[in-house]
Image (tube, rainbow, N blue to C red):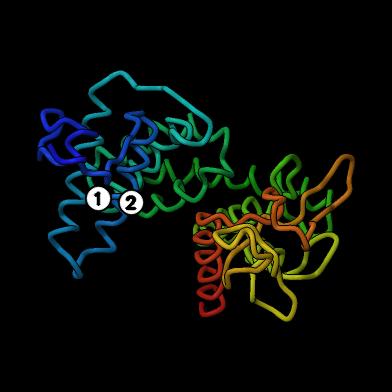
Amino acid sequence: PTPTEDVMPSDTMRSGRFDDRWAFTTNTTALNYGSAAALAAASRALGGYNDELAEESLQTARNVWEYEQGREPNTFRNANTTGGRIEEEQLKAAVELLLSTQEEKYADAVRALLPQVSERFAQNAFMLAAALPLMDEAYERDLRELTQAYRDSIGEFEAENPFGVPITRGGWAGAGTVISFGIANYWLNQAFPDIVEADLVHRSLNFVFGQHPASNYSFVSGLGPDSATVAYGSNRADFSFIPGGIIPGILVLPPDFPENKNNWPFFWGQNEYVITVGGSYLFLSNAVRSMFAQP
């Protein structure tokens, strides 16, 4: 026998040859809905570029939806590795499938989920607003009412700090939260500009670029005259940076001391690059640019 056959007997594998390109996944309902949402969205992006893959992506998303609709939810949860809240992941899948197919059953699902996700409206506003063009007037009225209540709640941040954004507390600094705040406000501004003003979008980007406590340097490495140049990523041991990487930034220590140790990369709660936040930043940047281009 060959060395690989000694490590892994051939009767345990389809090919009879050892292969280390394995992926071990968790079949949780939240992860499945989140994956279906990503695949449904990808199908639109792939259309006209790779139609075969676009169709496969959409059909897989449909199959996952039907699979989860036909079983008891698998609610296993472990930290941030098994998906978010089930109802919120299901909302994402329903909205993306609605946008990709315009089928009424997905609109019905969005409508049914609205009461469940409205308690965390700020976190779900971007999906709820994205569905609006394909929903009915009753949904629009409900969403308008929720948006007004949300706008009123922003007064808490405006009273707390001069930047008018949610500056988080705890072990992880708040650039990602501020960016998410700006993205939610972008979608709501597009839907209800009479309620959510454009400044609520701009102020989040301004925060990342330097309008924040303790300093005025940019949290985006290499962007601006002064930016985060000691960060924790794949370069973590060399006290350098990756252009375009985004750090969490200012961490507020109890009771009210803002800190960012910009000379020490190993404070991951302040200086670690996170890929998802980088993607969110790119979206917000393009959203703001599109707003300036609007008449």
> Farthest residue toward the top?
72
* Disc 2/disc 1 C-alpha distance (Å): 7 Å
* Of the image marks 2 and 1, the number of the one nearer the N terminus: 1
Residue 38, x across and y down, in percent: 34, 49
Amino acid bearing label 2: Leu
Q: Residues within 10 Å of mark 1 (few under 14, many from 20)?
A: some
Give the structural element (helix, strand or loop) at label 1.
loop
> Of 2 and 34, which appears nearest the observer?
2
Q: Would residue 175 appear left or right of 217 to someone viewing this image?
A: left
Q: Quadrant of residue 121?
A: top right
Mark 2–mark 1 contact, CB under 8 Å? yes
Residue 232, x across and y down, in percent: 63, 57
Dot label at residue 149? none
Residue 161, x across and y down, in percent: 83, 53
Q: Residues within 10 Å of mark 2 (few under 14, many from 20)?
A: some
Residue at x-position 77% and y-position 67% = 211
Per the image, the residue denoted by label 2 is 134
> Of 54 and 88, which appears nearest the observer?
54
Dividing the image into 4 quarters, which one contains the N terminus? top left
Above or below 4: residue 133: below
Give the structural element (helix, strand or loop) at label 2.
helix
Above or below 75: residue 120: below
Amino acid bearing label 1: Gln
Above or below 242: residue 249: above
Q: Would residue 75 appear left or right of 173 to someone viewing this image?
A: left
Residue at x-position 39% and y-position 50% = 131
Per the image, the residue denoted by label 1 is 102
Residue at x-position 46% and y-position 51% = 129
Residue at x-position 37% and y-position 38% = 110
